[in-house]
Amino acid sequence: MDDDYEVSEELTNALKILNFSDMMGLEEFITIPEENMVCEILDDDEIITELVNNFKKRSDGKNTDDLDEMDDSIEEEEISFNVALKNLKKVHTFLLQQEYTSEHLKLVDIIEKFIKKKQINSMKQTTINHYFS
């Protein structure tokens, strides 16, 4: 006997036990009519397409395919190595509290090594610049 059939039978029996005066079938009970749906679950490709389209949409509501035309006058805040490492530590702690995150924790370790390497290279470059100026 397949699992879906067993679950279906179990749910049907549970509905019968409730003894509703206006009994509906299981399929009718678990099926949401399309007009009552408030959101739709997108697959990965649809999500990526939506993100790209939202990114392309300019503030005036028009789409642009030319990223050079986009307003990039708002500069991002420069984040120091120490702030990046501190926030990465929070991500690491969060992942430790979750199940099945060993692969994610490995990625955090890789990112931490990358940031520390960049930090060391930056300090070396600052020292060289200071020495030759």
Image (tube, grey):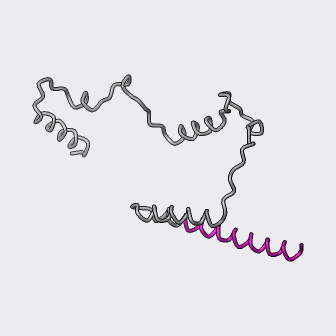
Which residue is rendered at x = 69% and y = 50% of the image?
76
Q: Residue furthest right?
A: 133
Q: Residue furthest bottom?
A: 131
* Percent of width and height locating residue 93: 46, 65
Q: Is residue 18 above or below residue 34?
A: below
Tell whether 9 sits left or right of 116: left
Q: Is residue 43 above or below residue 60?
A: below
Q: Is residue 122 above or below residue 35?
A: below
Most prominent secondary structure in the magenta stretch? helix
* Percent of width and height locating residue 116: 65, 70
Q: Quadrant of the N terminus?
A: top left
Which residue is rendered at x = 67% and y = 63% of the image?
80
Q: For residue 73: magenta?
A: no
**How many labels sit on residues?**
0
Q: Is residue 76 above or below residue 16?
A: below
Tell whether 81 sits left or right of 69: left
Q: Nearer the viewer, residue 90 or 8?
A: 90
Q: Quadrant of the C terminus?
A: bottom right
Tell whether 49 sits left or right of 99: right
Q: Nearer the viewer, residue 96 or 44?
A: 96
Which residue is rendered at x = 25% and y = 30% of the image?
27
* Percent of width and height locating residue 103: 49, 63
Which residue is rendered at x = 66% and y = 59% of the image?
79
**Quarter of the image where one finds residue 4:** top left
Q: What segment is highlighted magenta in the picture?
A: 108-133
**Quarter of the image where one finds residue 69:** top right
